Image (tube, rainbow, N blue to C red):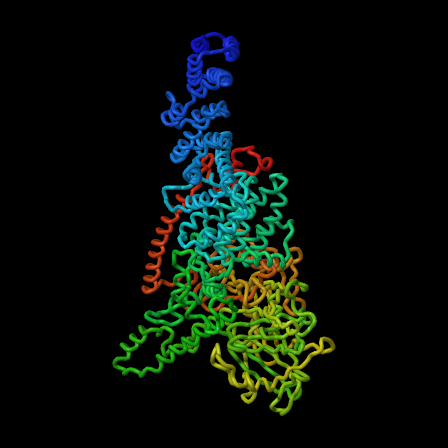
Amino acid sequence: MDKILEALVTSSHPLPVKRAIVRKVVEAAEKEVTEEQCQALYVLTTRLILLGKDAFERQTGQQVQESYARYHRDEFARFVSKDFVLGLLQQGYGSLDRRDPMLIDFLHSCLRLLISCPAMLEVAAALQNEVLRIVCERPAPALCSRLAVLLTDFPQCVPREKGHGLLFCQQLVRTMGYFQCTASQENELREYVTQVNRVSALLQGIWKAEPAALLPSLQEVFAIISSTDPAFEPSISLASLVQHIPLQMITVLIKSLTADPNVKDASMTKALCRMIDWLSWPLANHVDTWVIALLKGLASVQKFTILIDVTLLKIELVFSRLWYPIVRQGALVVLSHMLLSFQHSPEAFHLVVPHAVQLVQSVRSDGLPTSKAFLLQFTELIHCMMYQYSGFPDLYDSILEAIKDLPMPSEEKIKLILNQSAWTSQSNLFAPGLMHLPGKSETGKTGLVNLGNTCYMNSVIQTLFMATDFRRHVLSLQLNGSNTLMKKLQLLFAFLAHTQRAAYAPRNFFEASRPPWFTVGSQQDCSEYLRFLLDRLHEEEKAVRALVEAKPKPSETCASDESTASRQAPGAAHTPPASSSAGDEQTLVERMFGGRLSTGIRCLRCHSVSEKEEPFTDLSLAFCPPQVQHSPPRGAFNGSSDSPVVENGRVTRGVGPDTEWQSSSPPSHVGRSRPPVILPELVDYLLAPEILEEENCYFCERCSSLQPAERVVRVVAAPEYLIVTLLRFSYDAARQLRRKILDDVRIPLHMSLPVHQTLKPPPSHQQEAASSCVLPTTNSSDSGENQAKKLKQSQVEEEGDERVDTSTGLGKASVNGEGSMMDRPREDENGTEQRTISYVLTSVVMHSGMSSESGHYYTYGRNMSAVDYEDGSATAVSPSYLSPSNGEQEGLGTSSQSVKASSTSEVEGSHDPSSRDWILFNDSRVTFTTFHSVQNVTSRFPKDTAYVLVYRKQGSGGACEGETNGLKLGVEPPLQKELMDAITKDNKLYLQEQELNARARALQAASASCSFRPNGSDDNEPPGSCGPSGGGGGGGGFNTVSRLVF
């Protein structure tokens, strides 16, 4: 029979004829056949099955062997002997290698035919040893899959004796770690996933039958994924095992892993990174649950370094998984936990922010039934993160626009989510030094590293740096060998101007300039820090000058040599030569930021006048009470004196940090019930006349009694740089809370300040001595105790009082307009000449938050050009808060000059979207922005409000000629050798750091690269312009290759 069958399959007869004859051979199996004939047929059919040239031969062999084995079972059992099985698995068959999957398939079919034979026991025993040997040889996925199917159908062939069962599970897990897939077609990818699932199903069956093998198997999994061997990258196929691990084991396993002292941080980092990679495995359940459990476990044992490193390394990959519907939900859960728990720094969130808008647009258009629910969850996450890291309008504006039609969670819900997600024992102290800074900004400017709630300092430093004249004077000082604060500021300015770093860490300057009452690591008031810093610089320069002047005068014969030596002494440059003019005797802070304010009080009975001049470095503007917001103020408000007070160089009036609001309608704190305020209104409110009466009467020395009086405040000397502080923080007496006034203040690009110069001095007996210090550390006796005796607080009624006549000579602050009469000097009835000084905005410090002790500071700064220093009073300027339709100035009412808007655009081009004059400094982040963004940030982000503004005087001295105090505009002073050496040394160190970081990133990329990337695509790239598209079609199926995510 075997000869006939062999001749038949090799003949040239038509295929239907051959098949008819084969059926006759199969039917003949029922007849009696000798053992020799059976053995010959089994040998022939085995050869046809394993070595057949075509499908007909293999099919014929399979049919004939099955039919004869069914009727001649004993003969077949003797054929499939132990030696025959071992020969196939150890030596192969003919041209087939012993690793060929066809051999496993053949043995599988043979075992099905021997299922009830006693010989099965002997064959199963032989297979147990051979199966363990095969698994230890790390077979390919195809062979291992066929073997898994065989063992699943015949569990008696699974190794069990002498501890071989546990060893088999461990080796099978390790074999899966070596699985690699080189498939590029969809059908090949499907086959690969099927093969892996078969192996994991085998392990699941073994774990159910032998629970004791589960824990050692999981330990083997962790040993594989925690390997730090750069030559070995475990396969992502291990993710298929997670779904078979009982969830009730999570607590025990995670606690065991995180508390094990033998597990090194590097190994734990590798393991966590690879588990996060498992999110890419399709249809794997519970991967997100295990990843989050491990993240929480590490947080509970304060392994913050691992958490930070893993988050920054993997957050973009997790976000990229959101493009693929098949793994989207699990990826979103992990992404949410990673971002919400990473609360010490916005760095992780800002890594994914640039891709958020594109993702939202893609999900909106994919048409999947799960897309709406995903968008709601994703929007909630985005709002939570923007709430946690407010103060980045340039980053968040486009996101808000993309999700504006989706519901926003309440503030209470956001706080609850953030509190529940925070790391245990969270601390900000581990954040510095771990920031992965990007390349230097395209603006060419340098950021400042946040050293732990030091944004208040960073914003002030960038503001002073953008004060071009001040910066250039600081850099030109000869301070070699000095250890003063000015020297440290000079070095800091030099680094900001010339370092190659994207952001500089001002640790030395922070330690030297921090007020002693400021707590390290706590948020502080940037305005308070600015005043303290300027005061320190001023007093320091005066002290150095006094030391130099106190030296004994040299003899005339060596005067020239001694003069030369004194100029080379540390800090000598602070002191001008003896022949210098009076203006040069001022300190640098006085010359740049110093102004003078005159306070005059006129008795309404005897009309005697008492005047006092005091210096100031900033005007602190209170918000107008509602009843006087659009009219000149009078008297006090709610029992608080609105009188301007000069304290430590700071001019304040009305609502300040210690003002108590007692009315039923305090300023807006959470919402805005009032229209936007315009900055000139607040200046007018400060300078407006005031009637002192009733309990607030003035003690007149001539009358020797308390008398009603009129107080007038005037600016008599305008500073080069006008610093304006908005008093946004007030004390609510009813609630006993310090609150923030969130009123929107419209900021003009140009502003005019009325300045009064005395033409004829008043009688000497009516004039008080003026202070000579710009930043007095203590109040004078008259401005302190005596002034307090003269001024007693009184309640002023809201209605019925006569308004103060504004013809006393007080000029109003305004925005420069066309043909403004305020630009011409004019003499008032008091014998003073009033001039209007034009100013241009140079920088704005924004505060994001609800109190001075919390929140975030950032700065908008402007690159000044020579045109900006020219007096723009003769140029028609259209402020951005004017309506372009009618050109009328809004909101100034009777308290400011009217302005005629020009139809032409501003000469500064501030409304040009492509303008690159304005720069946003946000700690380490520095980006271009526009003046339009500066003015509209509060309307978009209610908690982000202007706090400190700096204006530069226009048309003053050398500025009109392109030169200021000997320094040419647009030209930075050359760096001194000491500064250049320090910067050169640091830049070399930076290049060395970059080289080491590049090597580390290369090693990380090699070890963290995914083992399975279809079509060679990078799994870190999102769809669209960044990578292959995904997310189309129905959910959950394998409709396209791009929807398989690895």
Q: Residue at x 57, y 83 (%)?
A: 611
Where residue 724 appears, x then y in whole percent? 54, 69
As drawn, 283 above or below 939: above
Most extreme residue toward the right, as rendered?
800
Q: Quadrant of residue 897?
A: bottom right
Where residue 409 appears, x then y in whole percent? 63, 54
As drawn, 1032 above or below 507: above
Which residue is nearer to you in this view: 838 or 786?
Answer: 786
Answer whether residue 55 is visible to the viewer in this image.
no
Which residue is nearer to you in this view: 158 or 352?
Answer: 158
Most extreme residue toward the left, as rendered?
557
Q: Quadrant of the N terminus?
A: top left
Where residue 726 appears, x then y in whole percent? 57, 68
Which residue is nearer to you in this view: 116 or 719?
Answer: 116
Disc tally is 0
Q: Residue at x 70, y 71 (%)?
A: 664
Q: Quadrant of residue 5?
A: top left
Answer whether residue 578 is visible to the viewer in this image.
yes
> Would you say 886 lies left or right of 867 here?
right
